[in-house]
Amino acid sequence: MFESLSDKLQDIIAKASGQSELTQDNMQDALREIRRALLEADVNLRVVKSFISNIKDRAEGEDVVHGVNPSQQLVKIVHDELVSILGKDASPLDYSGSPNLIMMLGLQGSGKTTSSAKLAVKLKKEGRNPLLVACDIYRPAAITQLKTLGEQTGVTVFSEEGNDVQGIVQNAISYAKENGFNTLILDTAGRLQIDTEMMAELMLIDRVFHPAEKLLVIDSMTGQEAVNVAETFDAQLGITGLVLTKLDGDSRGGAALSIVYCTGKPIKLTGTGEKIEALEDFYPSRMADRILGMGDIVSLVEKAKEVFDEKTALEMEKKMAKAEFSYNDFLKMKSQMKMFGSMDQLLGMLPGLKMSKDDRQMISHEGEKQFKRIEVFIQSMTPEERENPELMSSSRKKRISQGSGIPLHDINIYINQFEQMRKMMKGMSGLKGMMSKMSGKMGNEAAGKLSMHQMMKNMRRFR
């Protein structure tokens, strides 16, 4: 997401280095290029004007802090303005009400029904008991889609025949109270365009049931049109927040940078992939970090906590400490790493990797190819060899090479790299131990970052 804008902003900021202070003269070209980059990213003109004006007011005449060059100061200024435009602080969902009601709004094709199911999965992980309610009585395919998603995710779907949406919601609330559901996600009807009938129905639901959240689902690839849709919905219904979908496919990102400023309503959730788990809380500061190439290590650590089973991690830790880490263990770790998402997404979260989307995709593609090759190499071993790496002999290597179709030279390289990784892991005090030791000095979050960085480093060594 934001790849084009991100690349351009980083290039512009890099050009500001080497100056003794930020002046009107050396800022003029930078501001002109930033303005052009924002417009090319389909950012609303009102937002661009405000953004440039604020940067100019803050940057001009600032003395360079000792030890900090102008480009670093400019990064700070641009970062702060990006955070401000994106909403400053994260805005959590409102779970008030018994049961809690979340009304999902949006036009057809925005990803509203899929986002409803993704939200239900997210709430289940957080310990809530959601109920999906099919309120789109005009499009039978929407009800079928919701039921299918419910079956895939193990979330109950409430639906009824008829054309009384108010009655459906009322009956769903009664059903929820009787069966212990504490959050109702109302998948309301969408249209190809906003019309009076659509708004009247949504306003009726709002005024009768008073949902705690009215979330407008917006396709981020619609660009500036997303702002017009959001402003219309907000004027009629007073939306409480936004869900931006398809951020992984939008290289420009103009909608995300425009919509909060123009509506005054926060982005609460973002869809970043096709997987049912690909719905994330939105943090303005983390998004600003990504745009400016600073990565998003906090989100990476949070993903690690979700992906890695604690019991499995402890078992791995013990094996690492004793240098008993086997090829089977490597396959388990690789399988869990897949749950993070694509390697391209992971690279985008790592700080300090200043590379274009094309470069990341190329590295990701080559890395995935190499991992698959290693997987073939390991699967060509006997079960005994996979569990006991020290058994590897010349004759076994030759047999594995013939069975996998991988040259013996490459087999030797993989084995040597694996042995180096085992030695490194033995030298580690373990993920949990490292976090415990560091917590007193740096805090748990910083320790978590260090542990994750070390683990990623070790994984990259064996490829």
Image: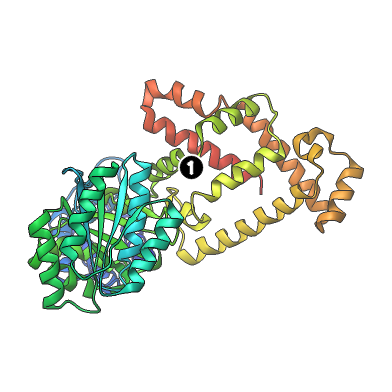
Q: Is residue 94 left or right of residue 75?
A: left
- Tell me where residue 40 appears, x and y as whole percent: 29, 74
Instruction: Confirm whether residue 192 shows in the render.
Output: yes
Residue 137: image quadrant is bottom left
Quick check: 366 left or right of 190? right
Q: Quadrant of the N terminus?
A: bottom left
Decide which of 30, 170 is in the foreground and name it.
170
Residue 34, horizontal then vertical, whole percent:
26, 66
Q: Is residue 225 above or below residue 246?
A: below
Q: How many marks?
A: 1
Q: Secondary structure at mark 1?
A: helix
Say which residue appears at 27% left-offset and 59% top-offset.
Answer: 243
Q: Residues within 10 Å of mark 1 (few under 14, many from 20)?
A: some
Q: Which residue is mark 1?
A: 307
Q: Amino acid at mark 1?
A: Val
- Visual colour scheme: rainbow
Residue that appears at 65% across and 41% down: 330
Q: Is residue 225 left or right of residue 327?
A: left
409 relative to 418, above or below: below
Is residue 30 depicted above or below 449 in this figure?
below
Q: Foreground residue, 203 or 291?
A: 203
Q: Is residue 15 visible?
A: no
Percent of width and height locating residue 182: 25, 43
Q: Give the residue displayed 52% in from the left and 29% down from the top.
A: 431
- From the top left corner, tell me how far across and down residue 26 is, in percent: 23, 62
Q: Residue furthest right?
A: 395
- Residue 326, by quadrant, is top right
